[in-house]
Image (cartoon, rainbow, N blue to C red):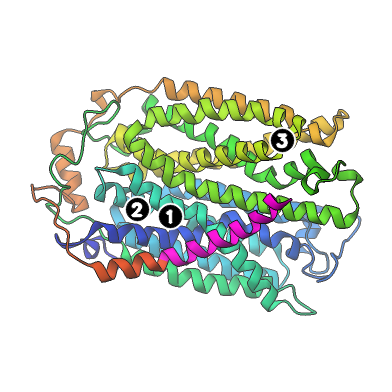
């Protein structure tokens, strides 16, 4: 059932049935972004109502202790492991995915991601954080990598005439996973919580079961273009700058300057954006404090109840950023089909630089609305950068090995997942140690992130077409196409009706997305009312 040959679609297959399959997987693994919803409950997993702290115990002893609650700093390592192993797995298994096909990769991704949640549940139940790091961080991270890249080359083969739209639709789901998963997890924890349990391990089991069904449906919904399939005549235009009709092998692509320039483009764009995501809530609270409630006071001078209100407003801000992250993935990726990938990234870096430099000005002036708009726009470009990069790769290196090339490029995400938060956190700590007030401690950080975007801009401006010496010969292309079972022989795309099936599958992914948007906007309304 999992063989690549079994995923070949008939000529009458409607290609718009494939994006919902990709969304079913990406909406599931995208919960990785929402894992912070578990940190506070897990920090009191033993004490339930209050954390049980153990003084004078070192890090190793705390890892194996069953009587001390875990600090949030230890739990946060799960988040780091997610993205380190996501990038590593994508790089290692990308070429295997091209040979094995997206269905097999999707099934393995489901086993790893959901199996990791079950292992984490056992780790929480036995209070062994090492099992949670292994389950969700390592094994789940591998599932993230495979699930993330599984639809890329498939969608690009189905949509050579609108690569940005296709990849944007799929990768939009990864940004939207937390928007659905975080409030769902919060509700499940409230259902499962008792006087002796915070309800986290039961929630892990429930989410693992839900996501396994969703991901398996997605994996079996994948189809590859049939032999002889081609888009309508004239749909694909290769006369645009940097768009090639040639093919480059993955092992050759990683030795070209274009690959490493794109690696720098992705790493620097993501480092800046992921730093903002990690500090969004505390940043808003410390910069504006009581102003969020209409009170002219800094955060440190507020009463405990007022601080709780400020935290609620900041949580709405984080949710709003998630929504704009999603919108940017489909919006900017679709726009890149018209603007071109190089111009799109040039806009990201130039506009992003102006916005990061403006953020301290908005903070000092107390312009809350302007501050929020700045970071909402920044998050659209963060998400748009992820969704546009696969199409950029296909433009430069062709479609035959784009999944494997994309997998290796995602090592930039692994590096950015460490670089961005480290730069942001250490600069803030350094500023506070120098006596800088908390509401001004982020100013230098914004300027550093703006500088990183200028370096990304330089990498993008240096982009040129791949030297023809790296192109595969016609014989090598034919061999590769025969191996992938998608060699063109002149047949034009035919689209079967499939209306009922289209309605069913798109409704299946639209309902949870709409629910997540509704929850996010309802929380954001609290922010705008303050």
| Disc marking residue 367 | 3
Residue carrying label 2: 97
Q: Nearer the viewer, residue 93 or 384?
A: 384
Asked whether 403 falls inside the magenta stretch, the response is no
Q: Earlier in the sequence, mark 1 or mark 3?
A: 1
In the image, taking residue 527 as reference, residue 86 lies left or right, namely left
Q: Secondary structure at mark 1?
A: helix
Which circle, 1 or 3, is nearer the viewer?
A: 3
Q: Secondary structure at mark 3?
A: loop
Residue 375 in view, yes or no:
yes
Q: Residue at x 83, y 45 (%)?
A: 290
Q: Main secondary structure of the magenta part?
A: helix
Q: Residue at x 37, y 69 (%)?
A: 217
> What residue range appears in magenta?
509-530
In the image, taking residue 131 as reference, residue 112 lies left or right, namely left
Residue carrying label 1: 146
Cα separation between marks 1 and 2: 8 Å
Asked whether 515 falls inside the magenta stretch, the response is yes
Q: Secondary structure at mark 2?
A: helix
Residue 418 in view, yes or no:
no
Contact, mark 1 vs mark 2 (Cβ under 8 Å): yes
In the image, taking residue 196 as reference, residue 350 lies left or right, namely left
């Amino acid at each position: 059932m999992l063989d690549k040959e079994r995923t070949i679609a008939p000529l009458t297959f409607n290609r718009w049935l494939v994006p919902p399959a990709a969304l079913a997987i990406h909406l599931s693994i995208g919960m990785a972004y929402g894992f912070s919803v578990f940190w506070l409950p897990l920090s009191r997993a033993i004490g339930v109502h209050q954390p049980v702290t153990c003084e004078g115990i070192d890090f190793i002893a705390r890892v194996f202790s069953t009587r001390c609650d875990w600090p949030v700093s230890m739990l946060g390592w799960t988040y780091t492991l997610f993205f380190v192993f996501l990038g590593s797995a994508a790089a290692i298994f990308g070429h295997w995915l091209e040979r094995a096909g997206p269905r097999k990769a999707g099934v393995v991704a489901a086993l790893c991601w959901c199996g990791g949640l079950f292992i984490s549940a056992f780790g929480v139940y036995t209070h062994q954080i090492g099992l949670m790091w292994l389950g969700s961080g390592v094994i789940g991270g591998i599932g993230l990598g495979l699930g993330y890249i599984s639809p890329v080359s498939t969608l690009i083969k189905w949509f050579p005439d609108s690569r940005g739209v296709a990849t944007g639709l799929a990768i939009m789901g990864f940004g939207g996973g937390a928007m659905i998963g975080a409030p769902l997890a919060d509700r499940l924890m409230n259902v499962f919580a008792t006087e002796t349990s915070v309800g986290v391990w039961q929630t892990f089991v429930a989410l693992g079961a839900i996501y396994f069904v969703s991901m398996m449906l997605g994996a079996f919904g994948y189809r590859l273009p049939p032999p002889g399939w081609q888009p309508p005549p004239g749909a694909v235009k290769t006369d645009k700058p940097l768009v090639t009709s040639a093919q480059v092998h993955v092992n050759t692509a990683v030795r070209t300057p274009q690959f490493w320039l794109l690696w720098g483009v992705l790493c620097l764009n993501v480092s800046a954006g992921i730093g903002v995501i990690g500090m969004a809530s505390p940043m808003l609270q410390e910069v504006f404090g009581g102003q969020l409630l209409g009170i002219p006071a800094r955060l440190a001078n507020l009463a405990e109840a007022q601080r709780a209100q400020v935290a609620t407003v900041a949580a709405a801000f984080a949710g709003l950023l998630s929504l704009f992250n999603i919108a940017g993935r489909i919006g900017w990726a679709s726009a890149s089909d018209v603007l071109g990938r190089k111009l799109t990234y040039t806009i990201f870096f130039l506009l992003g630089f102006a916005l990061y430099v403006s953020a301290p000005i908005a903070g000092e002036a107390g312009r809350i609305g302007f501050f929020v708009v700045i970071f909402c726009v920044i998050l659209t470009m963060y998400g748009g950068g992820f969704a546009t990069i696969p199409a950029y790769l296909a433009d430069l290196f062709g479609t035959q090995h784009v999944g494997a090339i994309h997998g290796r490029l995602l090592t930039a995400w692994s590096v950015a997942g460490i670089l961005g938060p480290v730069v942001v956190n250490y600069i803030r700590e350094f500023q506070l140690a120098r006596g800088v007030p908390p509401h001004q401690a982020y100013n230098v950080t914004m300027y550093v992130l703006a500088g990183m975007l200028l370096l990304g801009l330089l990498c993008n401006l240096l982009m040129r077409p791949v030297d023809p010496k790296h192109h595969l010969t016609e014989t090598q292309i034919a061999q590769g196409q025969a191996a992938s079972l998608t060699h063109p022989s002149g047949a034009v795309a035919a689209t079967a009706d499939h209306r009922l099936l289209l309605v069913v599958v798109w409704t299946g992914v639209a309902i949870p997305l709409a629910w997540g948007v509704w929850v996010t906007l309802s929380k954001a309304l609290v922010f705008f009312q303050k």
